[in-house]
């Protein structure tokens, strides 16, 4: 027998409190004879959000609210919670699954880029989305993606933080958008082709701004990195996990150039990013005349064959007990023992698992 009643998942009726108790709000024009208390002054009052003149006014009121959020914020939706339940299959309570676009809308990436520990993580995630997942995003998720990307570019231009990573992100994004709009005619993209052409022009404009970026010299009366003793500079080199950072730092002074070419430094870097089995595979390719290993050459040879280990200050976490993806606030976790989401496990910390950017993409592949 078909279900003819109202859908039980709907938000329900609207009610208002009166002197005689609660009364259900009946829209003017549907059952006028049962709603004689509504007067013309109430219908014309803009402060009454629960009264509508028919269904048309209800739709217009909803549209005005959406336009307010779209025009006054850079985010398509406003959420209080910084977590999302990852639905991977259909159940009796819910039919369907959580998409990548829904996660992109609900997780607060706009605020995450303001945290220096999360900036590289968000940038890498956006780079992976630009490479392969851009056509799968909904229109709302696309708007959120480009609005957040605009904030990322603006932060780099203002703070001069890690412009190399954002240049790589924009290069991959421009290549993807160009191939999807020009080569394929925009048939696989959500939205008008003219909008995507305008976005492509915006990306090229961002690339030009980052190319023209000039980082001014820091004027400080205190000690700088160059003034530190050599053994302290060497310790700082040992804590760098990016080979490009080591090379760029070594180009500043002759002393740092010698430290950046240290064989022990590059040997530690190889063992940090690659396993012994991987290093043994490329060992014969980098031997010198004295059967010594050129560890700097070893690193770049291994980099061509294997991916390097990803290092981030903070990442998204996934609760295996609740199937919830969330940002973990370390300050709240220490002060109030807050795990960052409504967890029902007896030991929430044992159920948490850090999520890499690639793992984040894989969570929404069905």
Image (cartoon, helix red, strand yellow):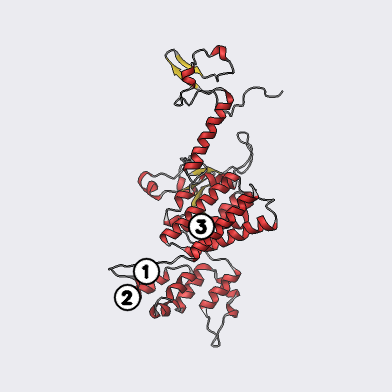
Q: Between tags 2 and 1, which lies in front?
A: 1
Q: Is residue 363 left or right of residue 163?
A: right
Mark nearer the N terminus (2 vs 3): 3
Q: Which mark is residue 217?
A: 1
Q: Indicate the position of residue 169 as horizontal and vertical percent values.
A: 54, 60
Give how far apart the Cα atoms at labels 2 and 1 are: 21 Å
Q: Is residue 228 left or right of residue 352?
A: left
Q: Indicate the position of residue 86 as horizontal and vertical percent values.
A: 56, 44
Residue hosting label 2: 229
Image: 11 above or below 271: above
User: Tag 1's secondary structure?
Assistant: loop
Give how far apart the Cα atoms at labels 2 and 3 are: 34 Å
User: Tag 3's secondary structure?
Assistant: helix
Residue hosting label 3: 123
Q: Name the residue located 54 percent from the left edge and 63 percent from the top edge.
A: 168
Mark nearer the N terminus (3 vs 1): 3
Neighbour tally class for label 3: few under 14, some 14-19, many 20 plus, Cα within 10 Å: many
Q: Name the residue located 45 percent from the left edge and 72 percent from the top edge.
A: 248
153 or 19, nearer to the observer: 153
Mark 2–mark 1 CB contact (< 8 Å): no
Neighbour tally class for label 2: few under 14, some 14-19, many 20 plus, Cα within 10 Å: few
- Asked whether residue 296 appears in the rendered view, the answer is yes
Q: Indicate the position of residue 230 as horizontal and vertical percent values.
A: 35, 76
User: Tag 2's secondary structure?
Assistant: loop
Neighbour tally class for label 1: few under 14, some 14-19, many 20 plus, Cα within 10 Å: few
Image: 161 above or below 52: below
């Amino acid at each position: 027998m078909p279900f003819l009643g109202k859908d039980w998942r709907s938000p329900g009726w609207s009610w208002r409190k009166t002197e005689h108790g609660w009364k259900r709000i009946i829209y003017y024009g549907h059952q006028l004879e049962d709603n004689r208390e509504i007067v013309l002054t109430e219908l014309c009052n803009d402060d009454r959000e629960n009264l509508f003149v028919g269904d048309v006014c209800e739709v217009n009121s909803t549209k005005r609210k959406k336009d307010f959020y779209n025009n006054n914020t850079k985010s398509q939706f406003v959420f209080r919670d910084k977590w999302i339940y990852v639905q991977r299959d259909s159940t009796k309570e819910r039919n369907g699954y959580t998409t990548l676009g829904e996660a992109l809308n609900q997780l607060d990436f706009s605020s995450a880029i303001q945290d220096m520990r999360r900036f590289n993580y968000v940038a890498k995630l956006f780079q992976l989305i630009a490479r392969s997942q851009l056509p799968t995003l909904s229109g709302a998720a696309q708007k959120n993606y480009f609005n957040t990307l605009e904030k990322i570019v603006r932060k780099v231009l203002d703070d001069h933080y890690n412009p190399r990573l954002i240049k790589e992100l924009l290069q991959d994004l421009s290549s993807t958008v160009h191939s999807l709009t020009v080569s394929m005619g925009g048939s696989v993209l959500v939205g008008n082709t003219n909008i995507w052409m305008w976005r492509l022009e915006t990306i090229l404009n961002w690339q030009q701004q980052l190319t023209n970026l000039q980082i001014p010299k820091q004027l400080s009366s205190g000690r700088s990195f160059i003034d530190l003793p050599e053994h302290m500079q060497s310790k700082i080199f040992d804590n760098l996990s990016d080979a490009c950072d080591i090379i760029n730092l070594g180009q500043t002074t002759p002393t740092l150039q010698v430290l950046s070419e240290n064989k022990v430094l590059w040997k530690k870097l190889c063992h940090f990013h690659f396993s012994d089995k991987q290093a043994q595979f490329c060992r014969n390719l980098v031997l010198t005349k004295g059967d010594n290993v050129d560890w700097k050459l070893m690193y770049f040879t291994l980099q061509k064959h294997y991916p390097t280990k990803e290092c981030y200050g903070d990442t998204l976490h996934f609760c295996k007990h609740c199937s919830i993806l969330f940002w973990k606030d370390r300050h709240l976790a220490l002060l109030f023992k807050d795990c960052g989401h409504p967890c029902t496990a007896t030991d929430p910390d044992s159920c948490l698992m850090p999520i890499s950017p690639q793992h984040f993409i894989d969570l929404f592949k069905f």
